Image: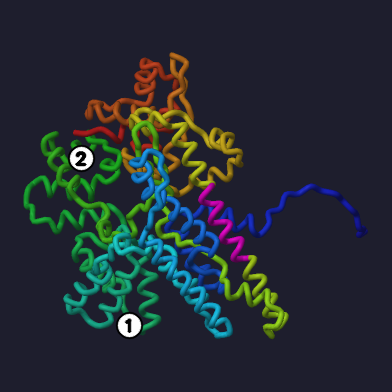
């Protein structure tokens, strides 16, 4: 039986302005610049530039600094005497302002007034410093993609048109590492269905083998084993070691992956010296033939902060050179406030909605700046030893420590830290680098787990390559140094560093 009940609940809901602020807060600097460009395109009430009041405050502050600098030497040389100082530039500017006011009064009824002209002329008030020639991005040089290079080589093979179409389809399915992850049978079905080519699996396999031998060699391989074998077969080296290396990959792949050297020697009837030379041939092969062909712009980190040292203090700057100042359009604002403008109710409602959106957006940008600077200042304060001494002085730090200082939620700190980078004198680091859990020591002082990872990496790099240390041995050495750490924690840190287990670190 259906019935209606009434319940009372307490829920927390975010306003549209809060949702917009949280989305903008988590954007890195490049994504923020693109977000501002998109908003400028869709919102006619949003414009680049500062408001009149902001420009006036900036001009007054600049005027005060100039007058103070020019009066200082005169006041110092006259023993307190009052001296009238005449500044020609100030007088010229005053005459120009008087001329502008006169023209405005005489042309008040014009459709495009002198006042609008001078207010829209940003160069008369402030310099748009983020658009200076020196700060422009260096244009990316033109380059030919790997796909274009492969297709150009494919056409030089002078195959039948239907096989060339198949080859282009295969090249189009190569991933960024240079491998063909898609099933070859599916590619054949697509080409035959679209072009009625009637290509057989044998013909497709022959085309694929010819693509393998294009530059870079091993491209479009279906797995690592095939990629390495193709490179060895195309190698100009005719030594015995190359032949043994091919046999290892073809006949002893499982033993090769698991580094079972004794089993490889037993099956191929070879000695240690020949095995070492064969592994040397394999070691110099390229496991990812598609790497090194990406654009430079895809592998470039733009820091969100700059931290520099000034004697005993640190200067923290937010990288907002590409973020222009924003304002609400004065023309549309006057259009809304004037009653005798003849606009419809729908148009007025649209303008009012866009104005609120523009105000929220500008407020979110300003709030983002304040929040990010507050978080970065606190990080520098908490990790001051690291910024002064460099790697090796990192202290344990969690999001809660920052949130308690600046009185914000942990989720807000997470949004600020995620995907943001800072440039320091010790290199460019992600903000997450400065956050880590603490590991207790015998002296009672907690040390960052990042420093423990660095110690583990150093121990492994100095180990005997023929007899690598186990996680148990590493744990024992760390405890001898005063770190109270478990074996499973060592394994977790080792995996985080991308270091394999001891069995796979064995070298001949």
Dominant SS in magenta: helix
Residue 350 position in % (x across, y down): 66, 75
Residue at coordinates 37% horizontally, 28% vertically from top-left?
A: 393
In the image, residue 376 sits, relative to residue 463, either above or below, namely below
Question: 329 and 374: which one is in front?
Answer: 329
Residue 81 position in % (x across, y down): 40, 42
Q: Where does label 2 land, which residue?
A: 267
Color theme of the render: rainbow
Which of disc 1 and disc 2 is earlier in sequence? 1
Q: Is residue 257 magenta?
A: no
Q: Where does label 1 land, which residue?
A: 197
Question: 334 and 117: which one is in front?
Answer: 117
All told, the count of numbered labels is 2
The label number, if any, that marks residue 459 in the structure image: none
Question: 32 and 367: which one is in front?
Answer: 367
Residue 456 in the figure: left or right of residue 267: right
Q: Is residue 358 magenta?
A: yes
Question: 217 and 140: which one is in front?
Answer: 140
Residue range highlighted in magenta: 357-370
In the image, residue 185 sits, relative to residue 499, either above or below, namely below
Q: Secondary structure at mark 1?
A: loop
Residue at coordinates 57% horizontally, 81% vertically from top-left?
A: 108
Q: Secondary structure at mark 2?
A: helix
Q: Mark 1 Cα within 10 Å, few/some/many (few <14, many 20+)?
A: some
Quadrant in which the C terminus is drawn: top left
The CA distance from mark 2 to mark 1 is 45 Å
Q: Residue furthest front?
A: 81
Residue 319 in the figure: left or right of residue 103: left
Residue 206 appearing in the image: no
Residue 161 position in % (x across, y down): 25, 83
């Amino acid at each position: 039986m259906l019935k209606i009940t009434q319940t009372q609940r307490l829920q927390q809901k975010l306003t549209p302005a809060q949702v917009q602020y949280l989305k903008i807060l988590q954007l890195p600097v490049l994504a923020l610049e693109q977000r501002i460009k998109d908003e400028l395109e869709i919102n006619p009430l949003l414009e680049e530039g500062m408001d009149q009041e902001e420009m006036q405050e900036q001009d007054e502050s600049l005027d005060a600094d100039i007058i103070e600098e020019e009066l200082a030497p005169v006041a110092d040389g006259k023993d307190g005497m009052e001296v009238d100082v005449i500044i020609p530039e100030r007088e010229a500017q005053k005459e120009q302002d008087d001329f502008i006011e006169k023209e405005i009064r005489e042309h008040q009824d014009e459709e495009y007034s002198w006042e609008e002209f001078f207010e829209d002329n940003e160069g008369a008030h402030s310099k748009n410093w983020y658009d200076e020639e020196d700060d422009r991005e260096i244009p990316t040089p033109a380059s030919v993609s790997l796909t274009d290079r492969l297709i150009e080589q494919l056409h030089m093979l002078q195959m039948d048109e239907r096989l060339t179409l198949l080859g282009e389809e295969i090249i189009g399915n190569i991933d960024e590492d240079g491998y063909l992850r898609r099933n070859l049978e599916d590619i054949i079905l697509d080409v035959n269905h679209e072009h009625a080519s009637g290509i057989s699996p044998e013909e497709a396999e022959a085309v694929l083998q010819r693509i393998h031998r294009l530059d870079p060699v091993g491209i479009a391989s279906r797995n690592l084993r095939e990629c390495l074998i193709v490179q060895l077969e195309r190698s100009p080296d005719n030594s015995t070691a190359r032949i043994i290396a091919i046999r290892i990959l073809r006949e002893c792949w499982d033993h090769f992956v698991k580094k079972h050297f004794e089993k490889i020697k037993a099956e191929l009837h070879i000695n240690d010296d020949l095995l070492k030379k064969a592994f040397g041939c394999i070691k110099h092969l390229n496991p990812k033939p598609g790497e090194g062909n990406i654009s430079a712009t895809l592998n470039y980190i733009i820091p969100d902060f700059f931290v520099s040292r000034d004697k005993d203090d640190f200067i923290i700057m937010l990288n907002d050179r590409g973020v222009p100042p924003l304002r609400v359009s004065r023309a549309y604002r006057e259009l809304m406030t004037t009653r005798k403008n003849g606009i419809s109710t729908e148009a007025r409602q649209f303008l009012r909605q866009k104005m609120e959106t523009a105000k929220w957006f500008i407020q979110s940008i300003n709030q983002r700046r304040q929040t990010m600077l507050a978080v970065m200042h606190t990080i520098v304060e908490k990790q001051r030893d690291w910024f002064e001494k460099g790697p090796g002085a990192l202290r344990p730090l969690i999001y809660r420590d920052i949130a308690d200082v600046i009185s914000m939620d942990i989720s807000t700190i997470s949004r600020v830290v995620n995907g943001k980078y800072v440039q320091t004198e010790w290199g460019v680091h992600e903000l997450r680098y400065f956050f880590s859990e603490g590991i207790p020591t015998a002296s009672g002082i907690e040390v960052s787990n990042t420093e423990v990872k660095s110690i583990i990496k150093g121990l492994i790099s100095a180990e005997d390559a023929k007899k690598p240390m186990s996680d148990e041995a590493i744990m024992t050495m760390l405890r001898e140094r005063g770190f109270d750490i478990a074996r499973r924690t060592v394994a977790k840190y080792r995996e985080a560093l991308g270091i394999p287990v001891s069995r796979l670190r064995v070298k001949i």
